[in-house]
Image (cartoon, grey):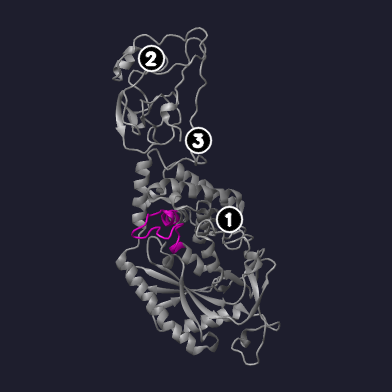
Amino acid sequence: MLPACLLRQTRSGAQGGLSRLSPPAPAVEPGACAGWDGGAVRRCPAPALPARGGAAPPAGAVQCSRHTASAAGRPSSPEAGHFVSPGWRAPGESDAVLREKGAAPTGKDPAPREKGAVCKPKETAEPLPLASYSCLGADSCIGARWLRDVLKTLSLGRADTSEASGLVNQLINTLVPVIKAQESTFSSIESLGTGSYYEHVKISAPNEFDIMLTMPAPRVKLEPCEQGSGAFFYARLKRNPKRYYLNKYLSEDKTLEACKMLSALRKIIKEFVKNTSVTVDKKKVGSPAITLRIGTLQQEISVDIILALEVRSQSWPASTQGGLNIKKWLGAKVKQEYKWKPLYLVPKHAKDGRMLKEDTWRLSFSHIEKDMIKNHGNTKTCCESEGRKCCRKDCLKLLKHLLDQLKTKHGNKRGLDKFCSYHAKTAFFQACVLWPDDKEWLFTDLESCFQKFLDYFLDCLNKVYLPHFFIPTYNLFGLIDKASSEFLSKEIKYEINNRFPIFKLQN
């Protein structure tokens, strides 16, 4: 960054555009910021940022984001202080005006330059690294503290978390044996916690849980769905034993019928919760989840049950080539370990325009996503008790909170319901690849890190393009119209430029 002390303030002189320097000002401690306060130099605790113009600062001083100049080169108020030395006068100011401002008069104007002297060109400040949109506010110190205060309000209460997780565990531990006993097809299922709660990025309240019921799949051939963008497949058995537990769910061409399997599981679960306080939501078209609701005195807890086929001993589909680009972030060894993990298939309809393709399965990498978020550091000690703390997960929580609050504010207007937390999580993974080093996510740099994360997300909105982290050919914004994307982008920019008023309303 270019120190502000190297910048010059130019003013128009009597002889058409002659540059004049302001009189020397008292020196301050190097790295300090001198602000305008009734003509006196005062200290400011804000961190140094590149100067963006204005009067020459005292020797050794640099400009901070708190102190911005007005269009005339002088502060509009003491609160909007700036590098203005005592005695500096604006064009046309008299000694009397300076005395009113508390500055000593300078006497005669500086002498014009000598004959033959060369006028030095006006120096300009280097641009901010993230100058696409406004920064978090006029005061980066206050902005940093305030964002951390917002994060505190998003933390889950220990007592509430313990109660909610206890109820969910009790439900799942009771439900799984019942499913195994009633249907031989599901006799080998196991539960696997996924989603934000188990990734430790759940915000506000522990009221949503995602549970995958995994079952080992036989040897299957994955045939890509034409409209699936590399994410949706038909699962066809390679062999068809005469007495096989999946026979009732096979079509004539030996394709596993996802709809039938999901309906059978839903029927068992609905029968199980009949005489309990747990309810089952109505079936959502195209959704792979069976949503259960547990009522408590404090809140309602939703549990999404998702059937998943576990596919082992099979290389990943060709559509995943170029995905999981984590070599510079987590390392080549970790990537190879992930590639050896099983694949999961969840019953999800592929869309062909407005039509839904039945019996398609979508690739799921929830188990790997959970591991990447929990072990997110470029170094093994990142965020450990003896390691340096980063702000990666904090930035993800803030973006999720921002999307939630905008949805609450606008409802389903302008298509905001099309955006979900998985979009935020995918953008998070892509940002970690763009900035892989832990030093680029220091906890002390929360405000600037959140800004660059938002800049990347805004860029995705402007292009209406957010590639799936594991399947680069699959655009997660592919079914989102340009108008909805532009509206969300506009709302986020407004929040950035006004220091997130939507956060203040909620706190």
> In the image shown, does 337 or 57 lie closer to the viewer?
337
Q: Disc 1 to disc 2, how far (Cα)?
A: 55 Å
**Label annotation for residue 466:** 1
> In the image shown, does 174 or 504 lie closer to the viewer?
174
Which residue does the numbered mark 3 point to in the structure image? 127
Q: Disc 2 to disc 3, how far (Cα)?
A: 31 Å
Tell me whether the residue at label 3 lies in contact with that at label 1, contact meaning CB atoms closer than 8 angstroms: no
Circle nearer the N terminus (1, 2): 2
Q: Amino acid at mark 3?
A: Pro
Which residue does the numbered mark 2 point to in the structure image? 93
Q: Residue at x 37, y 35 (%)?
A: 66
Q: Residues within 10 Å of mark 1 (few under 14, many from 20)?
A: many
Circle nearer the N terminus (2, 3): 2
328 inside magenta stretch: no
Q: Which residues are magenta?
A: 373-398
Q: Under tag 1, what secondary structure?
A: loop
Q: Residue furthest bottom?
A: 243
Q: Amino acid at mark 2?
A: Glu
Circle nearer the N terminus (3, 1): 3
Q: Nearer the viewer, mark 2 or mark 3?
A: 3
Q: Disc 3 to disc 1, how far (Cα)?
A: 27 Å
Q: Under tag 2, what secondary structure?
A: loop
Residue 420 in the image: x percent, y percent?
51, 60
Q: Residue at x 61, y 70 (%)?
A: 316
Q: Nearer the viewer, mark 1 or mark 2?
A: 1
Tell me whether the residue at label 2 lies in contact with that at label 3, contact meaning CB atoms closer than 8 angstroms: no
Magenta stretch prevailing secondary structure: loop
Q: Is residue 199 above or below residue 313?
A: above
Q: Amino acid at mark 1?
A: Leu
Q: Residue furthest top?
A: 115
Q: Under tag 3, what secondary structure?
A: loop
